[in-house]
Image (spheres, rainbow, N blue to C red):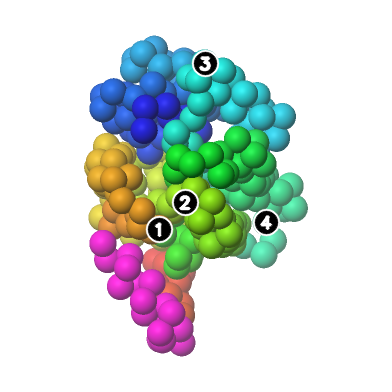
Amino acid sequence: MKRIVVTGAGGGIGAALARRFAADGARVVVNDLDADAANRVADEIGGLAVPGDAADEDHVRNLVETAWTELGGIDLFCSNAGVLSSGDENTPDAQWQRDFGVNVMSHVYVTRALLPRWLDTGEPKRLLITVSAAGLLSLLGSATYSVTKHAALAYAEWLRATYAHRGLIVQALCPQGVRTDMLTRGNADGSGSAALLAQGALAPEEVADKVAAALGGTGFLILPHEEVAEFYRLRATDPDRWLGGMNKMQRGFEGAK
């Protein structure tokens, strides 16, 4: 995979992925809403910056067109952009819409632009969707993140089930805590979940290493935190017990305030 696009690559996991791919010899297009951040990472790795909003279909179409022209094609697209905000059922509609746009529709826009170019070409193409362990489990303190990440996982599953026989390899990256600005902001918001995730948080570079290894295969779930597999199993096989445990944590967070 020598021609790669990474969204949300101005920092965090996205920047770590871009650096790792470039170090492995790939040509990388760096996308981020923050143009300065995208340019910094691109300059560092010798890549191409194409700033833009992953939640805007016109921007995504331009990103794909530009990357395709400059690289002569795309072998791997890392749909990595994401946002996290705290909140509950009273979170304003505008926040729900923004989070749904970035965490779900960005992936839809990528596939609208890429699949007509990728399917049935005779050469496997790979789409990596950064979901989060919240898509497999949940995240106390953020209704929007939990809901939209579940939706992102569902879309990734649907893509894999629908297009695997036509040359599309879809993989879902589902880390727990990662030491990024997103986690730092969660701690600043006073989220008990963010504080809990910070205890076992990985560096973005560690996540990038796990991704690089997983891209050698076709496994759907990429779980940098191995314990997530057991949590996911418990959620599926004994949901009452799992939900009881989650509510116990919620009560603990509330008691700590």
Label 2 belongs to which residue? 170
Q: Position of residue 34 (x, y in %)?
A: 54, 24
Label 3 belongs to which residue? 70
Q: Position of residue 155 (x, y in %)?
A: 58, 57
Mark 1 residue element: loop
When the figure is inspected, residue 122 is found, relative to residue 5, above or below; the finding is below
Instruction: Please state the extent of the stretch shown in magenta in the rendering.
Output: 226-242
Viewer-side label of 3, 4 = 3
Label 4 belongs to which residue? 91
Q: Main secondary structure of the magenta part?
A: helix
Q: Residue at x 68, y 52 (%)?
A: 96
Does the image show residue 70?
yes
Say if the magenta span includes residue 239. Answer: yes
Mark 4 residue element: loop
When the figure is inspected, residue 172 is found, relative to residue 122, above or below; the finding is below
Which amino acid, by three-letter code, is at mark 1?
A: Phe
Which amino acid, by three-letter code, is at mark 3?
A: Glu
The residues tagged by marks 1 and 2 sit, at their Cα atoms, a distance apart of: 7 Å
Viewer-side label of 2, 4 = 2
Mark 4 neighbour class, 10 Å CA radius: few under 14, some 14 to 19, many 20 or more: some
Label 1 belongs to which residue? 220
Look at the numbered discs 1 and 2 and tell me whether their residues touch, using CB distance below 8 Å: yes
Which amino acid, by three-letter code, is at mark 4?
A: Thr
